[in-house]
Image (tube, grey):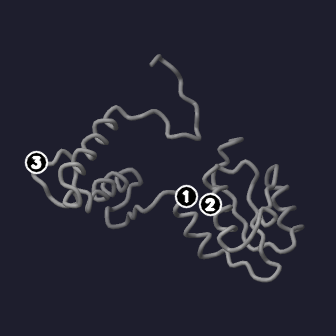
Amino acid sequence: GRDAIYLCGHSLGLQPKKTKQAVLDDLQRWATYGVEGHFDQDEAPSTRWWTIEDCAEEEASRLVGAQRSEVVLMNSLTVNLHLLLSAFYRPEGTRRKILIEAHAFPSDEYAVQSCVSSRGGSEEDIIRVEGGTDELVEAINATDGLCVVLIGAVQYYSG
C-alpha cells in the first residue's frame, strides 16, 4: 500500500502486522489436529483454543485497570445485541414496535430486522428516527405500540 491517514471509524481498521500469520497458524492447527486443536499440542503453531480467552482477559484487564478476575469477555456487539433483543423484545397485542435511530450501524439494523421477523413482525414494526435527541424523544412519545427503544452508544454515521 501507500502512506495514508486512516479515518474510517466504522470498519475493522488497519490490519495489525501479526494478524495474517496468526490466522495462518490457526488454520494450520485446524488442518493438523482437527478437534484436538482445542487442547495442548506442544508442537502446534498457535494458542490452544479452549483457553484462548485467557490471553485476551489479561490484556483487557490491563487496558481497563481492573483485576483479571473482574473482567469478562464474551461475544461480539452484534451477538450481544441479538441476546438482549431476544430477552426484551416481547411483542404482545399492539405493542410490537422497535424504535431505532436511522443510519444505525448496519449490524444493529440487521439484528433488529432479524428479531422482528423471527417474532412474526414486519418492516412496519421498525421505526427509524432521523435526527438527534429531541427527535428521538418526540418519536418515543408519539409512537403507539412501542415495545423496545434501541439507541446506539456511538453514532458512527454522524459522530
C-alpha separation, residue under disc 2 versus residue under disc 3 = 41 Å
Q: Which comes sooner in the sequence, label 1 or label 3?
A: 3
The residue indicated by pointer 1 is: 78
State the residue at coordinates (85%, 62%): 139
Name the residue at the top extreme: 2
State the residue at coordinates (67%, 48%): 155
In the rendered image, residue 72, in percent from the top left (x then y), is placed at 39, 64
State the residue at coordinates (58%, 38%): 9
Q: Amino acid at mark 3?
A: Glu
Q: Nearer the viewer, mark 1 or mark 3?
A: 3
Name the residue at the right extreme: 142
User: How many residues crowd mark 1 within 10 Å: few (<14), some (14–19), many (20+)?
Assistant: some
In the rendered image, residue 109, in percent from the top left (x then y), is placed at 67, 55
Camera-side residue of 72 and 117: 117
State the residue at coordinates (49%, 36%): 13
Q: Quadrant of the N terminus?
A: top left
16 versus 91 height, above or below: above
Res. 64 image quadrant: bottom left
User: Badges 2 and 3: C-beta atoms under 8 Å apart?
Assistant: no
103 versus 13 height, above or below: below
In the rendered image, residue 32, in percent from the top left (x then y), is placed at 18, 49
Is 8 on the left or on the right of 133, as rendered? left
The residue indicated by pointer 2 is: 111
Q: Which comes sooner in the sequence, label 2 or label 1?
A: 1
Q: Amino acid at mark 2?
A: Ala
The residue indicated by pointer 3 is: 43
User: Under tag 1, what secondary structure?
Assistant: helix
Q: Amino acid at mark 1?
A: Thr
Camera-side residue of 64 and 144: 144
Is 137 on the left or on the right of 32, as rendered? right
User: How many residues crowd mark 3 within 10 Å: few (<14), some (14–19), many (20+)?
Assistant: few
